């Protein structure tokens, strides 16, 4: 039996990962019919069927699973070998793949893209926006960014923000026709727009604290969404009030398009985290990105301290 070509091994791993010829073809960068033909030629060369195919599904055969188990560590070892050589380059290069939850994409990550790519022109970035908190290993991502601490134990984390304050807000048009709530229990008389978590389908209760007591409310309303942009849009249109992280509401509060309610009742939610596999040798593009983010955080803290000092000096006259 002749040895398989690297293209055939790459195609096999892609189909085994996605269990989809179409998705595997997109990942590898070839047409779906070409992917199908490559796998068929690979199976002919080996003399065994690697995948069971129907019009609706693709599954590994027992032989396919055995091959995957044997070859995956070998391929990972080759990848690590190439990465070790990459550290000797004068200019870091390679591809950095990130999976990012939707709210953090434009508000936190987007401002970093231009300066990072300008500093490292040989690095290519691929960013996938996905709110499902999926497995970055199986998705072949180098790292992920999302809100909250729902992160696997074998991951390392880099906090990107402090814990987020949760605010209850509404549009002036809504408040104009309804009495303003004085306490969280008053929310039962209001139309509260619910947010369903995309990754597990749950609807989280609204939590409140005023320094002396804590309270959890499960208000009801005529609208439930699983997208934060739609949540804010519906709130701005006056459909009802919502419970949202302060950074998302801040621009609209400053413009007067939203009004904060229950100002003495706030709560906190886990901030934004960057997470990545805890393997010893990280790919060069990921390492330089981590270093870049840490430098950006230090610069942001210095600017914040400087701004606070200016405010204090101005207040003292």
Image: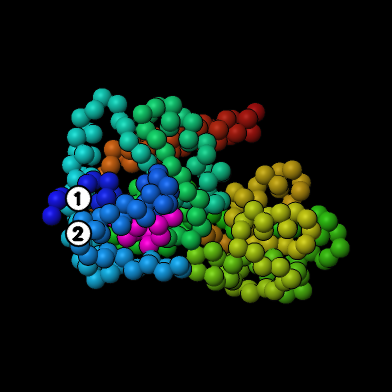
Q: Residue at x 40, y 44 (%)?
A: 29
Which element type, helix, strand or loop, lies under badge 1?
loop
Residue 102 is situated, as x and y percent measured from the top left of the image, at: 54, 52
Whole-percent x and y of residue 14?
33, 54
Secondary structure at badge 2 equals helix
In this rendered view, identify the residue nearer to me: 189 or 12: 12
Q: Which residue is under mark 2?
A: 46
Residue range corresponding to the magenta coloring: 12-23
Q: Earlier in the sequence, mark 2 or mark 1?
A: 1
| Residue 106 lies in the magenta-colored region | no
Q: CA distance from mark 2 to mark 1?
A: 8 Å
Question: Magenta span has 13?
Answer: yes
**Residue at the extreme top:** 90
The answer to whether marks 2 and 1 mark residues whose Cβ atoms lie closer than 8 Å is yes
Horizontally, is 144 left or right of 60 in the view? right
* Residue position marked by numbered label 1 in the rendering: 4
Q: Above or below — where is 94 with respect to 55?
A: above
In the picture as drawn, the residue positioned furthest to the left comes out as 1
Instruction: For the C terminus, give its image quadrant.
Output: top right
Residue at 41% across, 52% down: 33
Residue nearest the viewer, comparing 75 with 195: 75
Q: Is residue 112 left or right of residue 228?
A: left
Q: How is the image coloured?
A: rainbow
| Residue 252 image label | none
Choose between 231 and 242: the one closer to the eye: 231
The percent coordinates of residue 62 (x first, y second) are 24, 71
Residue 231 lies in quadrant: bottom right
Q: Is residue 109 visible?
A: yes
Please tell me whether residue 303 is drawn above or below residue 41 in the rendered image.
above
Q: Main secondary structure of the magenta part?
A: helix
């Amino acid at each position: 039996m002749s040895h398989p070509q690297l293209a055939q091994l790459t195609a096999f791993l892609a189909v085994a990962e996605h269990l989809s010829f179409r998705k595997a073809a997109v990942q590898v960068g070839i047409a779906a019919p070409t992917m199908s033909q490559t796998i068929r030629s690979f199976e002919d060369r080996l003399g065994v069927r690697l995948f069971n195919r129907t019009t609706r599904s693709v599954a590994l055969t027992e032989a396919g699973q055995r091959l995957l188990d044997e070859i995956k560590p070998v391929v990972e070892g080759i990848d690590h070998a190439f990465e070790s050589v990459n550290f000797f380059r004068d200019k870091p290069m390679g591809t950095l793949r990130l999976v990012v939850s939707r709210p953090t994409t434009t508000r936190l990550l987007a401002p970093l893209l231009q300066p990072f790519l300008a500093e490292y022109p040989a690095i290519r970035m691929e960013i996938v926006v996905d709110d499902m908190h999926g497995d970055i290993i199986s998705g072949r991502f180098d790292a992920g960014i999302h809100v909250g601490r729902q992160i696997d134990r074998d991951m390392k984390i880099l906090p990107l923000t402090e814990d987020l304050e949760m605010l209850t807000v509404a549009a002036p048009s809504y408040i104009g026709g309804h009495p303003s709530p004085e306490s969280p229990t008053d929310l039962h008389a209001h139309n509260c727009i619910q947010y369903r978590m995309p990754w597990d389908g749950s609807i989280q209760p609204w939590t409140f604290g005023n320094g002396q007591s804590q309270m959890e409310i499960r208000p009801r309303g005529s609208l439930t969404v699983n997208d934060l942009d739609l949540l804010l849009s519906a709130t701005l249109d006056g459909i009802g009030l919502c419970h949202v992280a302060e950074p998302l509401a801040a621009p609209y509060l400053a413009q007067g398009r939203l009004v904060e309610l229950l100002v003495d009742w706030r709560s906190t939610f886990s901030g934004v985290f960057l997470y990545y596999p805890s393997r010893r040798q990280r790919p060069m593009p990921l390492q330089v990105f981590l270093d870049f983010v840490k430098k950006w955080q230090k610069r942001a803290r210095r600017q914040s301290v400087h701004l606070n000092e200016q405010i204090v000096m101005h207040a003292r006259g």
